[in-house]
Image (cartoon, helix red, strand yellow):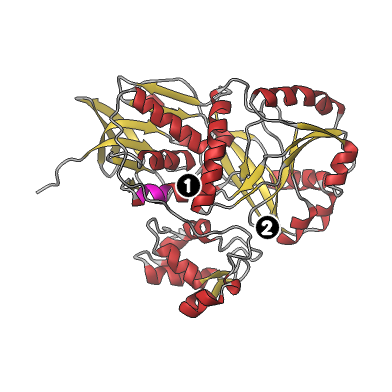
Amino acid sequence: MEPAQVTHDVAIIGGGVVGTAIARELAQYQLDSILIEAGPDVGVGTSKANTALFHTGFDAPVGSLEARLLKLSIQRLKSYAQEAGIPIEYTGGILVAWNQQQLARLPALQQDAQKNGESLHPLTAAQIYQKEPRLGAGVLGGLIIKEEGIICPFTPPLAFATQAKINGVNFLFNHRVTDITRKNDITQLICQQKIIHARWVINAAGLYADTIDQLFGYNRFNVTARRGQLIVYDKASRSLLSHIILPVPTQTTKGVMVSPTVFGNLLVGPTAEDLPDKQDTATTRDGYLSLQKMGRQILPALQEEEITAAYSGLRAATQHEDYQIHLDEKQHYICVGGIRSTGLSGSMGIAEYVVELLREANLALQPVERFKTVTMPYIGEDPRRKVSHNPDRIRRNPDYGRILCHCEQVSRGEIIDAMNSPLPPPDLDGLRRRTRCLQGRCQGFYCTAELVDTMAQRGPMSPGELLGINL
């Protein structure tokens, strides 16, 4: 006998930081919700390969929905980070003018930031060099953004999804929505493997948000994959810089920055390359060399520093300057598209806004009796994380004293904890984002075999599947 058809109250398409934030927000209500992700895990698209800025939104278009939701989100995300163990550092950012044209733009940027509720303060060249004495020659002036910071790009979607999961939200991975039909006020989301039925659908499909929107009969925006390549310098470089060094933004891009990371490295990037292929995350020789050159112009001491890794991500650029969030009450559909580079910082504000739209559309939102909280493993560069600083933990379980990834000081106990979590990693990339293994100098040269062996012992996947290859 075939199982009875299940009709979910809400189906979310897309498991990036925005989709998982919406899932977490919906988990606070008595709803049958499901998140559908084309990939094997949450946070596997744009969300895993961004610049990891905790962005204030000072340069968002004045009066835009983006500016409004960023403002709403920042305070919520600050509190949630403390609650859930998300690494954030409030380093502050300095917007640096390197030529007269950029210098002339600073007053307007300061005024726009003030309209967005952010106070930016002017700095002379001498003041900037006092704060960052290792910057290259040619600084003419700048603005300081005291609230700007850096954040772990991996933990937020994992925290949102984990909390949603333990509070009853269903997750369906490796299911790409290929068609959509409506019948008797129910939406049928057609995947190759099965059909999902839902009363409401939320499109948070990122790079494919325009495709899903078109399946609902609209042509409101087109998503262009804008590739951003970045290079990561070794931890020895971290002491060269205290603030995020930001360029004066243009209409096309926020430009190339040099920034600390919560993992103890320095980051240079991103590039901005519009591509026809929404899966082209390759790094290129030209991109690598241009970033290396620009990084050394901004911070000449990088000439002597080792590069640990290079990576690239795709952000969902559209022809519009603002978020593309639309409620279509008749079809019981909300489109959440065009989020671009502020999705992480704006995620909780976007989620709250989406739920308000559902409330306005008369979806019954009855709070749950108990909303379970979650605390994630802390993977920032903090002595508290390192097992060598916690002998009591090692005494209770020697696996926490057996280091598998020596570059990042990740123990076998932490790997096993990740495998036993409510949303276990499906592969090595998922393990990396949960524990930060494989991110160090050797890039997995010494630890991959033992990591794969440990994961294979704990789960049903073969070593080849864990590596993402056919053996």
CA gap between label 1 and label 2 equals: 21 Å
Q: From where the camera sits, is residue 288 visible?
A: yes
Q: Earlier in the sequence, mark 1 or mark 2?
A: 1
The verdict on residue 405 being magenta is no
Q: Main secondary structure of the magenta part?
A: helix
| Residue found 81% across the figure and 34% down from its top | 142
Instruction: Give the residue number, with chain letter if any, for mark 1.
Output: 157
Residue 415, image x, y percentages: 47, 67
Amino acid at circle 2: Gly
Which quadrant: the C terminus?
Answer: bottom left
104 or 81: nearer the viewer: 81
x 63%, y 27%: residue: 60
**Residue found at x 71% / y 30%:** 119
Q: Nearer the viewer, residue 399 or 72?
A: 72
Q: What stretch of residues is rendered in magenta?
A: 161-165
The answer to whether residue 219 is above or below residue 237 is above
Classed neighbour count for the residue bearing mark 2: other residues with Cα under 10 Å, few (<14), some (14–19), many (≥20): some
> Which residue is identified by label 2?
264
Question: Looking at numbered disc 1 in the image, what kind of residue is underneath it?
Answer: Pro
Task: Locate residue 330 relative to residue 450 in the image: left or right.
Answer: left
Q: Which residue is drawn at 35% across and 42% down?
A: 27
* Residue 149 percent location from the top left of the image: 66, 44
In what element is the residue under mark 2?
loop
Q: Is residue 471 visible?
A: no
